[in-house]
Image: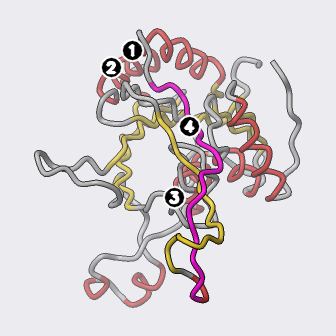
Amino acid sequence: MPTGSVQLIYIDPPFNTGRAQTRTNRKASPSNSGRLGFQGKRYEQVVQSVLSYDDEFADYWSFLEPRLEEAWRLLSETGTLYLHLDYRESHYAKVLLDALFGRDSFLNEIIWAYDYGARSKSRWPAKHDNILVYVKNPQSYYFDSKEVDREPYMAPGLVTKEKAELGKLPTDVWWHTIVSPTGKEKTGYPTQKPEGILRRIITASSKAGDLVLDFFAGSGTTAAVAGKLGRKFVTVDQNPESISTVTARLDQAQISYRLISG
């Protein structure tokens, strides 16, 4: 891809947790011995498929660093990189990105906070991800806060009625639920990110017709949201399960694309 050809890059790499990530798809089938369910009939859960990927790298940063270097090369002068990690790696990534982009190019660290899943009783439960935001040129980057979805005020009685009805601009802490296991967004792919998070990123840092790039397609959320918002997109993955999930998702959303095999 040509240098400086991309307006927005969102990267959601594997988090280097040191374990395999899996998600099991199940389907309820009629049964004589299963749980009592709809219309008084009994059903049992049948495993259809298990999606998985290896989330352990002998040298995680030898894997990620060259991709961050490519992100810097590909970004236009008005472009922005969003790097989505968790608490295990985000501090290392910031040091690396400060060296690569320059400390002046650091725009934000976004905290995506959610409240779902297991709760540890031996420490404060980890319920957030970190999204590091760097711009190619701090003097000319594109950011449009007017297009971003607004949030309800936590204390609407402290602002005017007009402001309460309009809502407030998001801060660098985003409260947003994960993809519901029973929601219509669900694809069954491990670590799928919700469309609301990508919609906020894409509307803030790109315009209609701009090119959005995702090195780790995964479930295809970036491609799906970019297509719906009228952006061009390139999304990359080598996992056949990912490619199948993304193409099915784009077909369902009636978003046109061209599949290129490496």
Q: Position of residue 10 (x, y in %)?
A: 57, 37
Q: Are marks 2 and 1 in contact (CB under 8 Å)?
A: yes
- Pointer 4 or 1: first along the chain: 1
Residue 140 seen anywhere in this rendered image of the structure: no
Q: Secondary structure at mark 3?
A: loop
Identify residue type, mark 2.
Val
In magenta, the rendered stretch is: 40-55
Q: Residue at x 59, y 56 (%)?
A: 26
Q: Residue at x 65, y 28 (%)?
A: 76
Q: Position of residue 121 (x, y in %)?
A: 13, 51
Identify residue type, mark 4.
Tyr
Q: Are marks 2 and 4 in contact (CB under 8 Å)?
A: no
Q: Are marks 4 and 3 in contact (CB under 8 Å)?
A: no
- Pointer 2 or 3: first along the chain: 2
| Residue 95, numbered label | 2
Mark 4 lies on residue: 141
Residue lying farthest to the left in this orientation: 122
Of circles 4 and 3, the one toward us is: 3
Vertically, is 210 above or below 31? above
Q: Main secondary structure of the magenta part?
A: strand
Number of marks in picture: 4
Of the pair 212 and 242, the residue shown nearer to us: 242
Mark 3 lies on residue: 179
Q: Secondary structure at mark 2?
A: helix
